[in-house]
Image: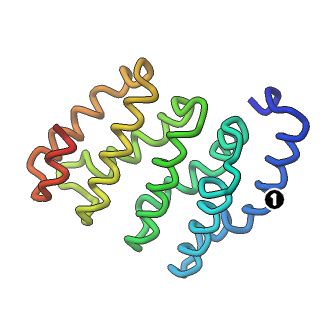
Amino acid sequence: MAADLSCSEKETLSNILQGIQRDINCLSEDNKSTRKRAIEKISKELIKKKPPLNSGVLQECLESIIKPVLKIFSDPSEKCRELSIQIVLDASSYVQDMSAFLPYIIPTCVQRLGQQEIIETCEELRLLLLELLIALVEVCREKMVMYIDDLVKILQKTIADPFHHVKKVRC
């Protein structure tokens, strides 16, 4: 994909990745505040940047950060989990091809929502995860077919969710 970028876009990509490399590394730190600051900076540099990044550049950036960001979906800190989910959700609106990330995102969502006992304890984050899945279904329609069993599993588990907003979104 990087081959499709112009020289200036490749330079932008390189500068961004160099600028957030320390933050990517900090996502695995023991200190909750360090992880939170890192995920906030990554979000600021990739998602909240003004003017917004070119979708091709954002795609390449996401390829570099998706695995560490998805690991934060299981972080002990609720705020870190929220920020990481929000990055992926926001990116789904701008990235050219989110289907490249489905093999990573869907299993992570199944881990949080599709187990015998739902792992995600925060109601608002369960809602955010469902919103992410809905966004992915909308932007990756045909590619979602291979994940239908996973989606059904999540829907089966969330049907009994006590949080009424989760039930409403699920329908």
> Residue at coordinates 70% horizontally, 35% vertically from top-left?
56
Helix, strand or loop at disc 1? helix
Percent x, y for residue 98? 53, 33
Task: Choose top left, top right, bottom left or bottom right for residue 79.
Answer: bottom left
- Residue extending farthest top: 142
Q: Is residue 31 above or below residue 159?
A: below
Percent x, y for residue 118? 22, 55
> Residue at coordinates 45% horizontally, 26% vertically from top-left?
140
In the picture of the structure, the residue carrying the numbered disc 1 is 18
User: Could you tell me which quadrant the N terminus lies in?
Assistant: top right
> Residue at coordinates 49% horizontally, 57% vertically from top-left?
71
> Residue at coordinates 43% horizontally, 58% vertically from top-left?
73
Percent x, y for residue 165? 18, 53
At label 1, which amino acid type do we have?
Gln
Task: Choose top left, top right, bottom left or bottom right for residue 44.
Answer: bottom right
Percent x, y for residue 115? 23, 48
